[in-house]
Amino acid sequence: MSSTSRSNAAAEPSTPQPASPAGAPSTRVLRQFRVVFNSVKSHFRQVEREAGVGGAQLWALSVIDRRAGIGVTELARELDIHQSTASNLIKTLVERGLVATSREGTDRRSVSLRIQQAGADILRSAPLPFAGVLPDALSALDAATLTRLEQDLGKLIALLEADETSGNVMLSQL
């Protein structure tokens, strides 16, 4: 191209070019977050539609079924949520007749949880994975990938100045 045609091209009004399908790295990563969030949301909707309970309730039911007699503190630990969140989950499950509580052992303050027949019926009809698609996918990743992901997400969380205690809120409750 000659210098004259270059200067003429520069003088012509430019028409906006469509963004390349790949886009900037930040746009591609944003799209990936959308794919992850939409996949999680779709699974929660499917659980609600097919099982009639929320994703967090289904996960709690599956843990109680697997670990009959588990207490609220251990359930909270297994679900990686705050104990008050676990207590609220249990309250709902008990009110719906899906879980029964009993006080066993020497510490009468401690509550043991057991699944009821209605809860077991829900587990039979519910789509897998009970813990949700994101925890299931994360558990399938190798240690090196998880370490890298944890470090990179830590940087993102710092830039967002996000409250890290919100990590104790289940995704199905967002």
Image (cartoon, rainbow, N blue to C red):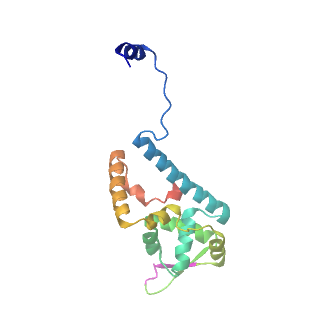
Answer yes or no: is residue 101 visible.
no
Q: Is residue 20 above or below residue 34?
A: above
Residue 88 point in image, percent of width and height = 52, 65
Residue 100 point in image, percent of width and height = 58, 77
- Queried whether the magenta region covers residue 109, the answer comes back as yes
Quadrant of the rendered structure where residue 58 is? bottom right
Residue 151 point in image, percent of width and height = 32, 56
* Region in magenta: 107-114
Answer yes or no: is residue 37 visible.
yes
Residue 2 point in image, percent of width and height = 36, 16
Out of 40 and 76, give the one closest to the viewer. Answer: 40
Q: Classify the position of the N terminus by image quarter.
A: top left
Quadrant of the rendered structure where residue 10 is? top left
- Count of labels shown? 0
Q: Is residue 107 left or right of residue 52?
A: left
* Residue sitting at x 40%, y 42%: 26
- Queried whether the magenta region covers residue 52, the answer comes back as no
* Residue sitting at x 55%, y 73%: 62
* Residue sitting at x 53%, y 76%: 64
Q: Is residue 131 above or below residue 24?
A: below
Out of 31 and 101, give the one closest to the viewer. Answer: 31
Quadrant of the rendered structure where residue 47 is? bottom right
* Extreme residue in the bottom direction: 106
Q: Is residue 65 above or below residue 126?
A: below
* Residue sitting at x 36%, y 50%: 157
